[in-house]
Image (cartoon, rainbow, N blue to C red):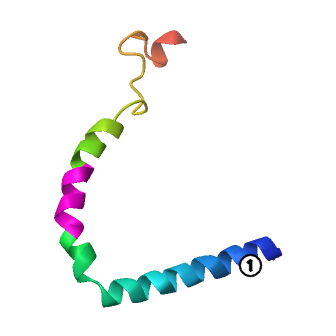
Amino acid sequence: MKWDRKWMLLAASLGVIFAFFLLREHWAHPLGLAPYILLFACPLLHLFHGHGGHGHGGHGEDLVGKDETR
């Protein structure tokens, strides 16, 4: 294992431990923000979800099936 990866693993582990103890002691603060986070997430999902992807398949341009082309 390279030293860079070891340092990243150590930093991530310390970050998780720090976050655990911080949230354990101050759980009321993030819990109080939860409704606002949900309200903020709704418009973000509408803005960023559903654009591109989903395989629209050309919208009817290829009307001939695979079996009919043989």
54 over 40 or under it: above or below: above
In the image, is residue 40 part of the stretch drawn in magenta?
yes
34 over 26 or under it: above or below: above
Q: Secondary structure at mark 1?
A: helix
Q: Where residue 16 sits: x, y (%)?
A: 50, 81
Q: What residue appears at the point 66 percent right and 82 percent down from the top-left corner?
A: 10
Left or right? Give the position of 42 relative to 4: left
Q: How many labels, in total?
A: 1
Q: Where residue 54 sits: x, y (%)?
A: 39, 33
Is residue 53 in view from this perspective? Answer: yes
In the image, is residue 56 part of the stretch drawn in magenta?
no
27 over 30 or under it: above or below: below
Q: Where residue 18 sits: x, y (%)?
A: 48, 85
Which is more toward the observer, 53 or 39?
39
Which is more toward the observer, 70 or 56?
56
Magenta: main secondary structure equals: helix
Q: Check the picture and name the quadrant holding the N terminus.
A: bottom right
Q: Quadrant of residue 53 in the image?
A: top left
Left or right? Give the position of 18 relative to 29: right
Q: At label 1, which amino acid type do we have? A: Lys
Residue lying farthest right?
2
Q: Where residue 30 sits: x, y (%)?
A: 27, 74
Left or right? Give the position of 29 relative to 52: left
Left or right? Give the position of 15 relative to 41: right
Q: Check the picture and name the quadrant holding the C terminus.
A: top right
Q: What residue appears at the point 66 percent right and 77 percent down from the top-left corner?
A: 9
User: Magenta region: which residues?
Assistant: 33-41
According to the image, label 1 marks what residue?
Answer: 6
Q: Quadrant of residue 46 in the image?
A: top left
